[in-house]
Image: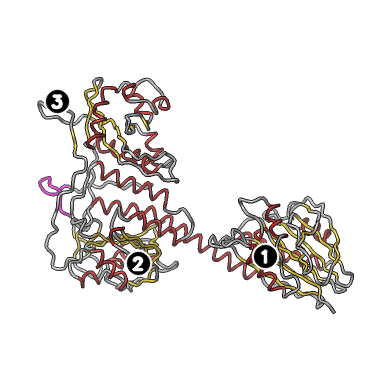
Amino acid sequence: MRFPRRHRRAPGPGGAASPPHPRPAAGHGAAAETKIEAGADAARDAGVLADIAASALLTGSAGPARRIADAAGTAIAVLDSECRWRYVNAAFVRVAGPAAADELLGIPIEDTALAAAAVVVRAVLADGRTRDHALAADAGTVLRFRRLPATAADPRTTVSASPHPAVLAVLLPAPQRQPGADQPREHPADPEPHPHPAPHRRHDAEHTHARPRDTPSATTDDAHLRRLTLLAAVAERVGSTLDVAATCAELADITVPALGIVATVEILPAGTAETAEHGSARPAGPPHLQRSGAALAAHVGPLELPCHAVRYPRDSPVAVCLRSGEPVAVYPRTDEELRSVAPDSATLEVFRSAGVRAVLAVPLVAHRRTVGVLVLGRGGESPGGFGADDVRTARDVAAGAAVAIDHARRYTRAQGIALELQQALLTEPGKPHTNLELAWRYLPSGTASVVGGDWYEVVRLSFGRTLLVIGDVMGHGVEAAVDMSNYRATLRYVAAMDLPPHRILRRLDALISEDDAARPATCLLALADPNRARWTVSSAGHLPPALVSAAGPTRLLDVPTGPPLGTGVGGYEQTTHELVPDETLLLYTDGLVERRDQDIDVSLAGLTALRLPGGGPLDALLASVLTRLAPHTAEDDIALLAARARTR
């Protein structure tokens, strides 16, 4: 979680805060820039820490927010709807009495040193108004009790949800009291921000930076709680996968309706100039983006924002935002002005139907590089548009999500390179002798794009013999693809010595083990000798081959299994099986049968239970195997190699 820096305006002449200095935006007149102000007094700091604890509770967080609250010097606690302690940090234990934090959990407040505050807590639960309780032992501090909303059940949380409200307790410096004020101080439960009409402008869609309108946002405890809860949700829920589209969709879903009624997440293509570091030259032309996530508030209606390529005009708020690296807002009053902030007719129709009257573009910046933009829209339900707190929250949300999006982009790019490398290295196997029919198939993993080290090879030997090879390098990624190429090249070199299969494995293992950086690999060799009607098979930790017959069931060959290649252990053996012309030998990698939730013996039994077209074309046989056995979304690469003796 990233917390904002605090800024304070420099005092102007006479001690008054000077107005923000105008900052010109490209293609426009001067635009007002306003720095966000935030109080720095002890009470506010303690309140922020308390909000962190509340956000951790509401989201079930066991991450940074919860750890900050646990280690805070401010006394923080939470009581449930029955006035029992649900959470206390170490600092609060000193207030509640001589007991460990674990001993307080589940105990009613009446049974602790703070029993006198029970009536205040019950009053807060009853009417939702925040109240202070003076401590008899310390006149300089008070316990502030504030009601928290009920939390819904969520399987992702680590703290059990509650359908009833709870109460947040935090120890604060005693506020200044008016003479005669002997009642507990009350605070409005949900005060409304005061309306602040924007000054008249000749063109109200003019871009403004940082804080577009100097509209006071709600600075109440509830506003801080909502903000920190949102940031905690971003930290935990955005980036749950390494898929760019899924990450962008998660960001859009979290920001609606918390920050607006419409949200789109649009990403710059990798390698474009806009992704250069801040301060470097940026193009002046219209930006090309890919809309990868969109969300609409439920009350907007059954509208859709298609995810596709979009292009904004050069002077649009999104273009200005990308060039400046700062949030930019517009407040369109007419349909023509609304048209200027929509990149296409579909977006314009959604803006019209939703009644969008304020648009905020926030850059997605990760590692000093702009990767895209978050566009938020608000309607008549937010007459003040986007205030200072809103801009700050949107910027922090975008900053946290941008890192997750950038990680997903980098991962996708790396996997793309690895896949291209693997496809380039995994060329077609060599041609067998004419007495052997051959077919092969390679299926990369599914949506995870995890490139593996699966490989196959065919080597023609003397006297009409053909050596079939299939292997799987341990691990994934570019390194596995490179090692796969090394294994294939070394295998060809050793096979040229015309050794029996088990000695080929022994020699291959010795050569690979000399390289400390090489990854181990499983490997299966099958030497076809149609002239002698014999298969000679040897395995280095690989799954057994399957023999498919047109007249009977599929069966697995019994092959002695040695250690994987690259270990330097050796000890490989071989076995022979009869080669029948109408039978097909099927070699495969573990991606075909291995399942995380299933024993390997059960998976292999599923292979032998298949009734395959043993007498038809080999391509049809491989297609049938993949259709009936491969998972819909493959968790690992799958390589298949099928061979059958040709009848004369």
Q: Nearer the viewer, mark 1 or mark 2?
A: 2
User: Residue 297 appears at what percent x and percent y?
Assistant: 31, 58
> Mark number for residue 485?
none
- Label 2 environment density (alpha carbons within 10 Å; few <14, some 14–19, many ≥20): some
Kindly identify the amino acid type of the residue bearing the numbered disc 1.
Ala
Kindly identify the amino acid type of the residue bearing the numbered disc 2.
Leu
The residue that mark 1 highlights is 639
Residue 12 on the magenta span: yes
Counting every numbered tag in the picture gives 3
User: Residue 214 appears at what percent x and percent y?
Assistant: 18, 54
Q: In this view, does 583 lie above or below 605?
A: below
Q: What stretch is highlighted in magenta?
A: 11-20
Q: Is residue 308 above or below residue 542?
A: below
Residue 597 appears in view = yes
Q: Quadrant of residue 134?
A: top left
Q: Is mark 3 on a helix, strand or loop?
A: loop
Instruction: Work out whether mark 2 precedes mark 3 in sequence or the reverse, and give the earlier one.
Output: 3
User: Residue 357 appears at what percent x and percent y?
Assistant: 21, 63
Instruction: Work out whether mark 1 precedes mark 3 in sequence or the reverse, and give the earlier one.
Output: 3
The residue that mark 3 highlights is 182
Q: What element carries label 1?
A: strand
Residue 312 on the magenta span: no
Query: From this viewpoint, which residue is outermost toward the bottom?
Result: 648
Judge by depth and name the residue closer to the eye, 437 or 98. 437
- Looking at the image, which residue is at 21% across and 61% down? 23
- Label 1 environment density (alpha carbons within 10 Å; few <14, some 14–19, many ≥20): many
